[in-house]
Image (cartoon, rainbow, N blue to C red):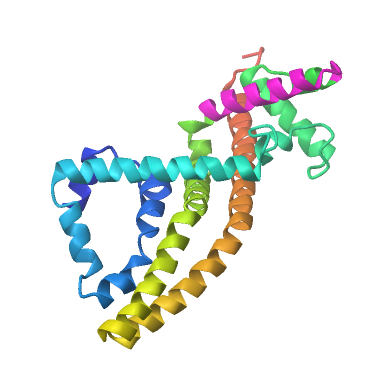
Amino acid sequence: MTKGWLSYVNLSDPYERKARFLPAALSLLPLVPLSASMGAPFLDWMKILVGGVGLGAIVAVAISHGASACGNRLQESLWPAWPHDSPTNLWLQPENRSVSSQQKTRWYQSIKDLVGLDIQAAASSADPEELKAVINDAIRALRNRLWSAPEGERLRLHNIDYGFARNLAGLRPVWLLLAAGSLVGCWLGYARLGRPLLWAVVSTVLAVGTFAFAWLLPSYVRKKAHYYAESFFEGAVALTGKTQTSTPSKGE
């Protein structure tokens, strides 16, 4: 059933499922204590909500794109000059000291061999805007080369991980609000309606954990972005080696 309607709305793709749909679904988990406290099991009304394929498709698409939009907004706050200050672009800047000059020279050569763009020549032009444009063009072209290549498998996995972390962090206002609402609702239910104390305690623990997790998430997103950049350049170097190996020499 679940696989059927996810496939129906084109959520069978791993990125769609894990990086977009899953963060949106997880954002609703703070409602579990409140739902249980009020005698309306969370999973039961979720099944009702997505019970029909048509309605399920609408809900899945809506919350998936909502998660992506929230993630993009967070991304812009973490890297205001996106994509030029993202790790992938920033590490190619000649003045950036987080990567050695020798490593950057190696990457420049790989990029030149694979997509024909010369970042070192652009750096010598003394035009910072041209340099940023060449770097970004190189990243886009190389990403297209890697996306379907075996050398890009690790990159694709890290892209999903980054998308999941970014979108979940972008949805913080949603799940923090739901956690706070669940906390208040469970304690009111206990104090005024005689609902079980257990769910009031669970909602308290969940709210504390949720707020702590929200504080940690931005640094986690940055770390995932670094892993993405590392796998991006590792894939580029590996693809360069494969291309050079498969290219016959002039004497052959």
Magenta stretch?
124-145
State the residue in front, 113 or 75: 75
Residue 86 image position (x, y, % from top left): 66, 39
Residue occupying image coordinates x 65% and y 25%: 136
Q: Main secondary structure of the magenta part?
A: helix
Answer whether residue 130 is magenta in the image: yes
Residue occupying image coordinates x 26% and y 74%: 36
* The image quarter in which residue 123 lies: top right
Residue occupying image coordinates x 39% and y 50%: 18
Residue 252 image position (x, y, % from top left): 61, 14
Residue occupying image coordinates x 62% and y 43%: 77
Q: Where is 108 relative to 207, above or below? A: above
Answer whether residue 160 is magenta in the image: no
Which residue sits furthest top? 250
Residue 85 image position (x, y, % from top left): 70, 37
State the residue in front, 155 or 164: 164
- Count of picture labels: 0
* The image quarter in which residue 238 lies: top right
In the rendered structure, the answer to whether residue 105 lies left or right of residue 190 reads right
Question: Taking the image as drawn, is residue 81 in sight?
Answer: yes
Q: Where is 76 relative to 161, above or below? A: above
Which residue sits furthest left? 52
Residue 51 image position (x, y, % from top left): 14, 52
Question: Taking the image as drawn, is residue 12 in sight?
Answer: no
